[in-house]
Amino acid sequence: MSYDVLVIGGGPAGLSAAVNVRARGRSVLVVSNPLEENPLWKSERVDNYLGLPGLSGREMLETMRRHAEKAGAEFRDGRVVSALPSGGQWYVGIGSDMEHASALILAAGVARGKKFPGEAEFLGRGVSYCATCDGMLYRGRSVAVVGDTPTAKREAEFLQGIGCTVTYFHRPRHCEIRGGAQVEEITCDGVTQAVDGVFLLRPAMAPTDLFPGLEMEGGYVKTDRRMATNLPGLFAAGDCTGGPLQVSKAAGEGLTAGQSAAAYASEASRKARTT
Ligand SMILES: Cc1cc2nc3c(=O)[nH]c(=O)nc-3n(C[C@H](O)[C@H](O)[C@H](O)COP(=O)(O)OP(=O)(O)OC[C@H]3O[C@@H](n4cnc5c(N)ncnc54)[C@H](O)[C@@H]3O)c2cc1C
């Protein structure tokens, strides 16, 4: 199905964006890791959100999510692993599935943790961020899964199910990936394993891995006051655009990004009707 706007990330920024896209009468799909994997979920008490002091992170996220559902936003659990513009639409890979929309809002929070040595070098030559997309290439072969989310375990089971021999590294502190033309081995926390493929299943990807050519500033996505990035039809909001890394700022930027993306989608459909 085609949407006017697709939002990547279902935290405060993404949910606020979704509410405000719906307020402009446009369709919106929010694609996100499960709510309970959001970093705020574990917070015992949030005291500085205006008008609603004292909620736990979980209560706050559930309240915001209900608001967006009531406004008519659609939701899909999943990890966005690719996004490509083509013919005035953005095509977004969610595991091995695809959705498309006129405008995108990146509201994916901050990608915590540094890249491992060898990760960038072997990306596409044995290193992958998505087991359900690339798993078949490694059928019957030996792979490592480096995971730090509950869904990573399920992706490791999927690889086992298609006949891969899987070595699972749960939240290692340090890994190094080595090889020649392709990946040949991985060492995590002192354990070395010969492998043909390495699946790095983190909850969030660096914005520039998802959007090659995306302009950054000080490690964060660069936007203008409309929350537009340098890529046409891509807006960004929340922690991914920089500090203060706080809920109020995320919700406020989500509002602006939602309105801007809705206006962009309206203009795109007006142009499509007149050509
Ligand atoms: C323990 C803790 C306590 C905090 N306490 C406070 C507080 O008291 N007050 C305050 O104002 N702020 C607090 N914060 C900060 C607050 O949580 C963040 O500023 C806020 O959640 C940012 O919202 P966001 O929507 O930008 O990003 P996030 O809330 O991080 O949401 C982004 C979502 O996108 C998902 N995602 C990322 N990449 C992808 C992808 N490729 N595909 C699908 N989904 C993806 C992530 O899993 C996540 O669920 C706290 C944070 C933590 C961790």
Image (cartoon, rainbow, N blue to C red):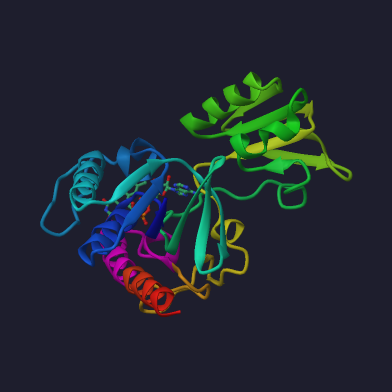
Q: Residue furthest left?
A: 51
Magenta part mainly helix, strand or loop? helix
Residue 241 within the segment the image draws in magenta: yes
Instruction: Please tell me in which quadrant of the rendered image residue 269 appears.
Output: bottom left
Whether residue 172 is visible to the viewer of this picture, yes or no, is no
The spot of residue 89 in percent (x, y) is 50, 64
Quadrant of residue 244 within the rendered picture: bottom left
Rendered residue at 76%/22% (across/down): 140
Residue, far right: 180
- Residue 78: x %, y % from top left: 45, 40
x and y percentages locating residue 239 in the rendered image? 40, 59
Q: Residue at x 78, y 45 (%)?
A: 125
Q: Which residues are magenta?
A: 235-259
Q: Is residue 174 above or below residue 245?
A: above
Residue nearer the viewer, 15 or 216: 15
Nearest the viewer among 154 and 27 is 27
Total numbered labels placed on residues in the image: 0
Residue 215: x %, y % from top left: 56, 72
Residue at 73% x, 29% y is 143
Residue 270 visible (yes or no): yes
Q: Quadrant of residue 235?
A: bottom left
